[in-house]
Each structure stands twice: as C-alpha cells, then as structure tokens.
C-alpha cells in the first residue's frame, strides 16, 4: 500500500493547489529537441554524472514527453527488476552454425529468404562501388 | 581537456580495451574504434558543463562505463557475426518479454522486436556506411536499459504512425501502466453570486494563481521534477525511490546534499519514507513562498490569504481555479 504523506492542513491545501496547478499547466513542448535514448536510459538507471544531468533535469521539467518517457521507463525497470543478464556463451560456435542463426535474424529484417539477405549485401557492395566511382 | 588529462584518459581507455578484448577476442573491435567511441562520449561529458574537467572527473566517468556492453554494441554495429550471435542469445528473449509487456497483442510485440532488430542492424546507408542504432549507444547505462528505451520509443512511433492526430495523453494512456492523466478543468457552472462577489473572487483567483506559479518557480529544478513526477506523472513513491536507487544517481545526491539531517546510511536504499520527506520539504517551501507572494504582490492580509486558499480548495471539488490558465494569464497582461 502506498505510504501516505502526513501533512498539516495548510500543507495539504498547498499540495492540492500544486497538484491542480501542475496538471492544468503541463507544457509538453520543450524548446530544444528531445533527449536521446542513450541519455534517457542512463538517467533512469541513475548512471548519469551530475555534471551531465543538470541540463537533463532542466529539460525534463519543461518537456512532458521526455518526462513521461522516463516515468514509464522506471515502471518498466521495476517490472523487470532482478532479471540477470545470462552469462556469455563460451562455446566455440562453428561459424556455419552462427551464420545459420544470423540468417534467421536477417531474414526477418530483409525478407523471407537467404537470397534476400545476400541480395541486400550485394546492394551494399554496389552502392559502395557507385560512391567510389562518383568520387 | 588539457594534455595531461587526455593522456590519462588514453591510458585508462587502453586498459579498458585490453580487458574487453581479452574477454571477447572474436568481436574484432579495434582499439581505435573503441577509443573513438569513448572519446566522443568523453567530449560530450566534458562539454556538458562549463566547469573544468578534472582527472578525477574523467576517471570516475570512464569507471562507470559499461565497457563489455559497449564492446558488444560496437562489434554489432560493425556487423560482427559472433557479437550478433551472442547479443541474440543474451538479449532477444528479454526484448521479447519487454515488448509483450508493453504491446497490446503478441503480433504487435513480435513486430516491435523485429523493427528494433532492423534499427539495430541498420538498413539505411549514409555515405556508403550502414547506419546502425548500436552506434548511438555510449555505454553510460546498461545495454538492457538502453534496449528498453529503444523498444519503448519504437512502440510510441508505431502508435503515432497508426493515428493521424494523437495527443500525448491518448498516446501514453494506452501504452504501459501509468498514463499522463491530464486533469483538464471543467467549465465553471453558472454562478449565482452577484457582481461584487464575482469580482472579488476573480481578484482572489488571479492572486492565488499568480502566487502558486511564483512559488513553484522558486523551487530548484530537482524539486520541480520531483513534484511533477508525483503529481503529473502519477508516479508512486516506490517508483520514485527506484529512480534514485543507484548510489550514483545525481537526483539522489542532490536531495541528500540538501537534507539538513543526513540519512543515517546515505549509501543505503532510499526508502519511500525518504521520498515522502523530500516531498514534504517541497510543500513547506512552496507554502512559504506562496504566502509571501500573496502578501507582497497580491497585497493581501492574512485573513484574505486564508480566503484565497479556502476558495481554491472549494473549487477543487468542482470548478477549477486554474480553468483557462492561459486565458487568465493573457487577461492579466491586458489588465496590467
């Protein structure tokens, strides 16, 4: 059960006034761009140095979108708290077997067949070639 | 950064690279690639504040980097198969669980994970180079924390793409647990007060609104953020304490510095009761500033201040004291 804050009557009134004021006056548009994923996740995990976090805290006060994102990320963090990262797999992993797994991954990204994967790689090579010729 | 600190950082980064390389020699990450990533992050860190960076600052900063995660991310950004295989082994099922937790359907969750993989691999070619999302990971937080953020944003983008005009409230209410509950004011009911009463109420209302705005503005950003998390984002005390759980958390450090009575165990877990105390301090500060503003700027006496807060409290039950806040602001500007 959520602990209740025990306030005197005046503080209770201020709490109510503040709550009303803040929820009625949410400014969702920060003048600068939004915080990047990398900084957001580091802030939520508490690993951002104070030097970096000053500007981020200032932004979160003004930007409802980023602030709400951090709130949701905290909830997500709590939902998955305690899960440990599995240890690295130390098996030698024959290259061919690794490639089979990767083909599966890349087929989802680029298409349903290995041909689509290799076609993409061929396209990359061609683009690089074209860029080289242009330069 | 001066040369001495630069040299020191090079040494530390070199040591970090050796450790990572020893653990994962098959990732084929070069020392130059590793150093380049860390130097970019270090430069951003150095530029984030006008104060001079010290050697200790730089050491502490580098000491907090999740070097193994960064090493894997760099290898994946380079397309290293071994790194990709290990990443998939270690993190895919976790990503799927996170996506299922957030998405409405299993299909949506699967689509999101596939979409994130696409971003991580990078399907865009810019100047002949494949642009991988992994390149944006700096190692300042854990890779799993970063993945949660990427998944969250992917879901938000997907949701936006499916709706033409979506307000922040609509979008976030349907994603995750807590939504931003915009408590917009109701229209005031037709008053039965006569004109004099109405004008008096209006005077008190403007004074109260101005005073509470001014009082909030006197708070430091950390205090404002705490109140916004509690009242606007509806974060529970245990959620806020989670946010400040890490001993290195700058929010935590800030509030602990401001606390006259230091917690008995500053390195320990921040209890919900501690967050409650922080909130109480904020309310006390706001109350003082609020009263002071009403006295000084509103020209009200103690009795009138009591009336103001009473009226505002009554209005909380039905009409909103802060109805048309922007209108009242502009009206105040016109009348002045």
Image (cartoon, coloured by chain):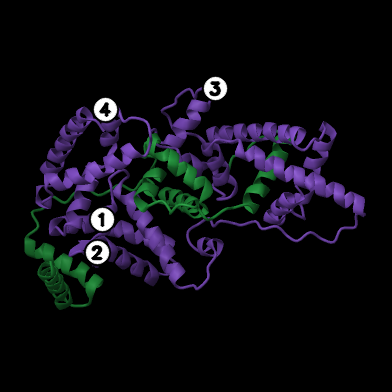
Chain colours: A green, B purple
Please, which chain is the residue tagged with disc 2 on?
B
Mark 3 vs mark 4: tell me if same chain: yes
- Residue wearing tag 4: B55
In contact (CB < 8 Å): disc 1 and disc 2: yes
- B258 over A42 or under it: above or below: above
- Label 4 Cα neighbours within 10 Å, binned few <14 / some 14-19 / many ≥20: some
Seen at 40% across and 35% down, the residue is A50
Callout 2: SS: loop
Tag 1 and tag 4 share a subunit:
yes
SS for dot 3: loop
Q: Position of residue B187 (x, y in %)?
A: 75, 61
The chain holding disc 3 is B
Q: Is residue B11 left or right of residue B100?
A: left
How busy is the neighbourhood of tag 1: few (under 14 within 10 Å), some, or many (20 plus)?
many
Residue B213 lies, with reference to residue B191, above or below; the image says above
**Which chain is mark 1 on?**
B
Q: Secondary structure at mark 4?
A: helix
Report how far apart the C-alphas of labels 2 and 4 lie in the structure: 36 Å
Q: Is A131 in front, or is A93?
A: A131
Q: Is residue B249 left or right of residue B170?
A: left
Question: Which badge, 1 or 2, is on the more N-terminal residue?
Answer: 2
The residue marked by circle 4 belongs to what chain? Answer: B
Closer to the chain start, of discs 1 and 4, is 4
Q: Mark 2 highlights which residue?
A: B122
Mark 1: which secondary structure? helix
* For discs 3 and 4, the disc positioned in front in the rendered view: 4
Nearest to viewer (mark 3 / mark 2): 2
Disc 3 marks which residue?
A: B260
Disc ID at residue B243: none
């Amino acid at each position: 059960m959520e602990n209740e804050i025990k306030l005197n009557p005046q503080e209770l009134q201020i709490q109510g006034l503040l709550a009303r004021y803040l929820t009625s006056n949410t400014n969702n548009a920060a003048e600068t761009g939004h915080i990047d994923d990398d900084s957001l996740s580091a802030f939520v995990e508490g690993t951002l140095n104070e030097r970096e976090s000053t500007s981020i805290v200032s932004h979160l006060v003004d930007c409802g979108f980023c602030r709400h994102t951090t709130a949701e990320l905290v909830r997500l963090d709590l939902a998955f708290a305690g899960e440990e990262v599995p240890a690295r797999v130390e098996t030698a992993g024959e290259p061919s077997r690794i490639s089979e797994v990767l083909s599966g991954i890349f087929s989802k990204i680029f298409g349903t067949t290995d041909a689509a994967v290799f076609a993409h790689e061929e396209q990359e090579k061609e683009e690089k070639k074209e860029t080289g010729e242009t330069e | 950064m001066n040369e001495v600190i630069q040299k020191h950082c090079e040494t530390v980064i070199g040591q970090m690279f050796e450790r990572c390389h020893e653990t994962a020699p098959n990732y084929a990450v070069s020392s130059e690639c590793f150093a380049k990533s860390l130097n970019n992050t270090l430069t951003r860190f150095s530029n984030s504040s006008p104060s001079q960076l010290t050697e200790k600052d730089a050491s502490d900063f580098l000491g907090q980097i999740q070097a193994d995660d960064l090493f894997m991310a760099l290898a994946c950004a380079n397309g290293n198969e071994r790194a990709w295989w290990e990443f998939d082994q270690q993190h895919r099922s976790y990503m799927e669980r996170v996506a299922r937790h957030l998405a409405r359907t299993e299909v949506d969750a699967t689509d999101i994970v596939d979409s994130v993989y696409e971003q991580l691999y990078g399907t865009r070619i810019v100047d002949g180079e494949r642009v991988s999302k992994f390149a944006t990971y700096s190692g300042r937080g854990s890779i799993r924390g970063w993945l949660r953020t990427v998944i969250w944003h992917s879901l938000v983008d997907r949701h936006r793409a499916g709706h033409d005009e979506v307000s922040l409230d609509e979008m976030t209410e349907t994603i995750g647990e807590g939504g931003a509950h915009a408590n917009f004011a109701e229209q005031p009911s037709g008053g039965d007060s006569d004109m004099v009463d109405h004008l008096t109420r209006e005077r008190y209302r403007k004074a109260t609104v101005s005073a509470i705005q001014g009082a909030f503005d006197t708070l430091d950003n950390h205090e404002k953020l705490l109140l916004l998390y509690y009242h606007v984002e509806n974060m529970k005390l245990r959620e806020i304490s989670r946010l400040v759980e890490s001993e290195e958390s700058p929010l935590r450090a800030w509030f602990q510095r401001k606390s006259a009575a230091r917690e008995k165990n500053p390195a320990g877990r921040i209890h919900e009761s501690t967050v409650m105390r922080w909130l109480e301090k904020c309310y006390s500060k706001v109350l003082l500033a609020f009263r002071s503003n009403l006295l000084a700027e509103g020209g009200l006496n103690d009795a009138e201040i009591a009336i103001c807060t009473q009226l505002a409290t009554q209005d909380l039950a039905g009409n909103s004291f802060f109805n048309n806040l922007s209108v009242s602001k502009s009206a105040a500007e016109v009348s002045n």
